Image (spheres, grey):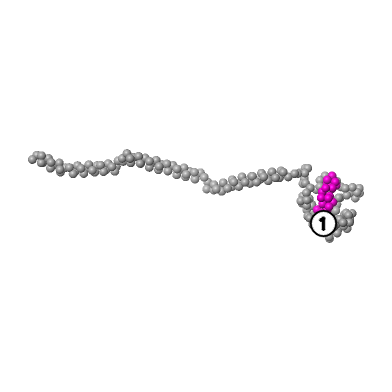
Amino acid sequence: MRNTILISLLLMFLPVSVSAQFYTITRDSELLPTERQKEAYKHVEKDVTKGEKNKMMTKDTLTVRPDNQKELDDNSRNSDRKASLKTELQKKTDDIPKSENNLPELTIPNLYKEIIRNGILYPKIVLAQAILETGWFRSSVCRNKHNLFGLTNPRTGKYYEFNHWTESVRAYYTKVQYKYKGGNYLLWLDEIGYAEDSEYLEKLNEILKFI
């Protein structure tokens, strides 16, 4: 009889105990992570932390980089390109031969510019005169006396001598063209007896075809 009562009591308390134990296990599982869960949490926390650091570094980099960085980079490249072009231009300029005292060399373009610079009328005709008088700048009067137009001193009959060919261009105006008052310039040259050669005007016209 006593055994029957004990068994009955055990059967009454057994569901409560099992239920309490199951509840405890369930709550402990929810509240306390297992070792595997702890490792997983560590990896997640590490990855999240690393991601936040990378984001902060990226943000810092973007903050340091100015908004107009592309424009600044382009300007820098343009500056380098301009500096390079300037250097090349300087080298080419240095390679151009210069005459004594940095005065311009006797070339057709330089002579034409000098004629215009001195306010001389009909610059192409005057250029043709210089070419004809000097035999394309090869005559001794041109080389030794820098006289481009065969200008002579009326008192001595000798050729004027100049220190530089640019002086003879100025002399052409002060000794020849200042007398010109208008009309056909070629005929005027013939009228004043500029040259003794009877074919002077024809020869000038031939040269004018090439300049």
- In the picture of the structure, the residue carrying the numbered disc 1 is 206
Name the residue at 32% across, 39% down.
Answer: 35
Left/right of residue 151 with respect to residue 2 in the rendered view: right
Task: Look at 85% across and 57% down and name the residue there.
Answer: 202
The answer to which of 184 and 66 lies nearer the viewer is 184
Residue 167 visible in the current orientation: no
Q: Is residue 92 left or right of residue 142?
A: left
Query: Which residue appears at 81% of the width and 50% of the height?
Result: 136
Q: Position of residue 171 (x, y in %)?
A: 83, 50
Residue located 68% across and 46% down the image: 89
Of residues 41 and 162, the one drawn nearer to the viewer in this rendering: 41
- Lateral position of residue 125 relative to residue 1, left or right: right
Q: Quadrant of residue 1?
A: top left
> Where's the C terminus, which quadrant?
bottom right
Three-letter code for the amino acid on which mark 1 is drawn: Glu
Q: Position of residue 115 (x, y in %)?
A: 79, 52
Residue stretch in magenta: 126-147
Residue 146 part of the magenta-drawn span: yes
Instruction: Please tell me in which quadrant of the rendered image residue 194 appears.
Output: bottom right
Which sits in the foreground, 43 or 147? 43
